[in-house]
Image: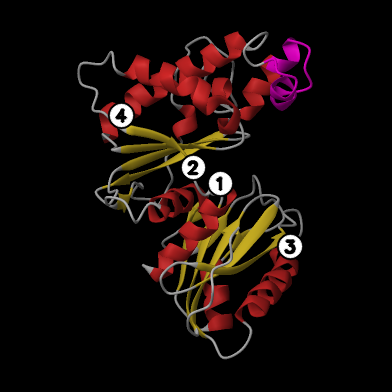
Amino acid sequence: MEIAKAVNEKRGIGIDIGGTNIAIGLFSPEGDILDSTTIATNANAPFKEVEKGLFLAVDTLLGSNIELLGIGIGCTGPLDTNQGVIHNPYTLPGWGAVPIREIFQKRYNCNVQLENDANCALLGEVFARRGEESVRNALMLTFGTGVGGAVLINGQLFKSDTFGHPEFGHILVALGGEECYCGEAGCLESVASDSALSKKAKLLGFYDFHDLVKKGGLLTKGEAIVEEWSTAVSRALWTFAHIFSPSLVLFTGGVVESLFEIAKPRIIKNMERGHFYGDFTLERSILGIDAGVVGAATLILL
């Protein structure tokens, strides 16, 4: 991550909480990152233990003589973003219910905002493109251990009345396909996630999907995997594009680096068959792992 030069003493903090690591960034009022650090999440430990490391990291980044403009926090859900509470027994099993906004407000006496990590990643990517024409309608799909996503509609994040986050990974794309923990078979996550691709790679004699890529098998033994992934993602995008009409679609996550350039022309070709298809620009993430922490900072800086 490139470190920008400090320009004044007003600063914002962005925090991206993942299941393994927590990234913390120090930002200028304009959204430029000035410094950053990473600590372990310790997802199985009580939050009180993690809290100490978080406070120390933030205090170290802030130093002295700094006016704190606010703290934006992105976290994997479930969350209650209205109340500022984390409720995630799945990837943060030791934490319990954490009123994180209240905790940070008491400590730092500033504006604190909490948002889903996928939403923050989308906000970060849109912000990174601020020098271009303003993006007001965008869709992001994240292909990692699972499949997640986020949508921006007319400049606003798409969320339910209960502050829930849409589960784009569980839209059906291959009826009768692999069973998923969601209760159905053939959903996008069950056929297009890193986990799903690794299962297929193992059947071909590789350790996982990344081993297949590393050993150059993607366009030989793995050609069927590429085609299945492209088809599944195209089917999901067919639905998303006709519902949300995005001008920008972003792919991010571990498998995207290997599949994007190969799959992109196949996906676009599949989309162009639609009579009601509206063109969109299909791009990969430009911020990578920094998207979440940048997006979190935008919650309080913009």
Query: Residue sitting at 54 percent across and 59 percent down?
Result: 293
Q: Residues within 10 Å of mark 3 (few under 14, many from 20)?
A: some
Q: Which of 161 and 235 is in front in this view?
A: 235
Q: Which mark is residue 285?
A: 2
Quadrant for residue 280, please give it: top left
Q: How far apart are marks 4 and 1 (CA)?
A: 23 Å
State yes or no: discs 4 and 2 in contact (Cβ < 8 Å). no
Point out the stretch of residues depicted in magenta.
201-217
* Amino acid at circle 3: Pro
Look at mark 1 in the image and give the residue it sits on: 288
Going by the image, does 258 lie left or right of 235? right
Q: Residue 241 carries which label?
A: 4
Q: Earlier in the sequence, mark 4 or mark 1?
A: 4
**Residue 72 position (above or below residue 258):** below
* Amino acid at circle 2: Ser
Callout 2: SS: loop
* Amino acid at circle 4: Ala
